[in-house]
Image (cartoon, grey):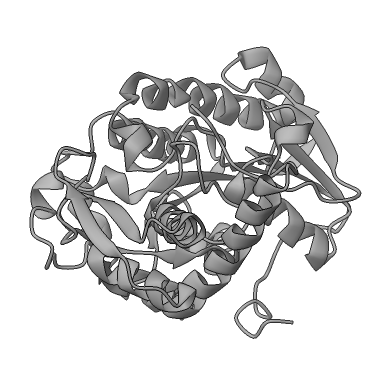
């Protein structure tokens, strides 16, 4: 067993029911497979997408197609659940969340109905996937941003739409613990990437988008790449396997009940440097063009991991160079498969 996970004390029997909301998506699909591989025998994955559009499907898992913005669907989804993981949301990369704020904010319906349903069903633990978009945007106006610590969410000035929706849900989780004794856990994700994620269609995040653009430029012989913004924007990116480990550790640490915590890498990288890495992986050098009118988000954002190291003695540690190489290889396989007319994992607006 992974050394980081050997000491996790789960108050969960192997035949207790785990429910993963958003189980047909990127992180939800990985989390479902993870718990199955650990040895849990009753897992229910729920997503509104048709089954053929799920990013991953794990053998032996109960798959339900339900719209979790509806109260009745949430009640059905969490029947007999011991633990509920809320990864269901209408979201994507910056190109999506800047243009479709209403859709992002409507995820509040999911969060409101799902946590109440989990409480009514008698679930023991409830996890909410928040985002670094909750942080005060006034602290993120310089590419050389200082790492954001958990207290930087207040005074509140979250990213419009998506960030405010996440911040409200965090508070909802805290109140369900304070008033109703439901053990809730919240992780603020910092740019999760990796294989089996969205890589085309408008919802993809920067690592996947850059990989696809490099692969496409090589394939078509265009030898150029369009970059959103001026290339100076900085972010930290967390590899999906680190994200999944972190979720498990956070949910099963009672010191973190109703306590939002950063879950992200502290390795800061600019968009220009991301492109350079993707070029090296693809063994190509491209002419760069910049679109200053495209969605670019805040100038800089990084994760302060002081708290997670203090509580868990751990932090996401997959080097970005390594994770991007694995992501690039997977997207290249998908790209080739699509050219051959095969069905591939992506998302469209």
In the visual, does 48 lie left or right of 253?
A: right
**In the foreground, 276 or 51:** 276
Location of residue 6 (image quadrant): bottom right
In the visual, does 268 lie left or right of 55?
A: left
Residue 193 visible? The answer is yes
Give how far across and how far down residue 193 sits, in percent.
49, 59
Residue 149 visible? The answer is no
Please report the residue visible at 55 percent of the width from the left and 65 percent of the height from the top. Answer: 327
Give how far across and how far down residue 323 sits, in percent.
50, 73
Instruction: Work out which residue is located at the far bottom of the displayed protein and give it.
Output: 3
Give how far across and how far down residue 214 sits, in percent.
42, 61
Please report the residue visible at 26 percent of the width from the left and 63 percent of the height from the top. Answer: 287
Give how far across and how far down residue 47 sits, in percent.
68, 31
As displayed, is residue 5 above or below residue 71?
Answer: below
Instruction: Work out which residue is located at the far front of the displayed protein and give it.
Output: 221
Picture quarter with the N terminus: bottom right
**In the foreground, 149 or 175:** 149
């Amino acid at each position: 067993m992974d050394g980081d996970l050997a000491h996790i004390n789960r108050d969960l029997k192997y035949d207790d029911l785990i429910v993963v909301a958003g189980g047909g998506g990127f992180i939800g699909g990985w989390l479902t497979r993870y718990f199955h591989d650990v040895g849990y025998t009753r897992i229910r994955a729920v997503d509104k997408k048709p089954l053929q559009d799920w990013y991953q499907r794990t053998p032996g898992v109960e798959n339900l197609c339900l719209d979790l913005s509806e109260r009745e669907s949430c009640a059905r989804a969490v029947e007999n659940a011991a633990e509920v993981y809320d990864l269901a949301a209408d979201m994507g990369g910056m190109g999506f969340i800047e243009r479709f704020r209403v859709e992002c904010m409507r995820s509040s319906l999911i969060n409101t109905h799902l946590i109440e349903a989990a409480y009514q069903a008698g679930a023991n633990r409830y996890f909410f996937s928040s985002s670094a978009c909750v942080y005060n945007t006034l602290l993120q106006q310089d590419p050389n941003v200082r790492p954001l610590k958990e207290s930087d969410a207040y005074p509140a000035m979250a990213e419009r739409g998506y960030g405010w929706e996440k911040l409200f849900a965090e508070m909802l989780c805290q109140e369900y613990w304070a008033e109703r004794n439901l053990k809730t856990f919240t992780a603020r994700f910092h740019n999760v990437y990796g294989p089996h994620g969205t890589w085309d269609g408008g919802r993809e995040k920067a690592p996947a988008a850059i990989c696809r653009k490099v692969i496409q430029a090589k394939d078509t012989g265009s030898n150029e790449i369009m970059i959103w913004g001026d290339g100076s924007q900085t972010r930290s990116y967390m590899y999906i396997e680190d994200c999944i480990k972190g979720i498990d550790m956070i949910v099963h640490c009672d010191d973190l009940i109703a306590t939002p915590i950063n879950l992200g890498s502290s390795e800061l990288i600019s968009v220009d440097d991301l492109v350079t890495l993707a070029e090296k992986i693809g063994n190509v050098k491209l002419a760069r063009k910049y679109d200053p009118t495209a969605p670019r988000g805040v100038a800089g954002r990084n994760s302060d991991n002081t708290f997670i190291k203090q509580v868990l003695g751990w932090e996401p540690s997959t080097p970005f160079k390594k994770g991007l190489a694995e992501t690039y290889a997977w997207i290249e396989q998908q790209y080739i498969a699509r050219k051959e007319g095969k069905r591939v994992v992506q998302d469209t607006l």
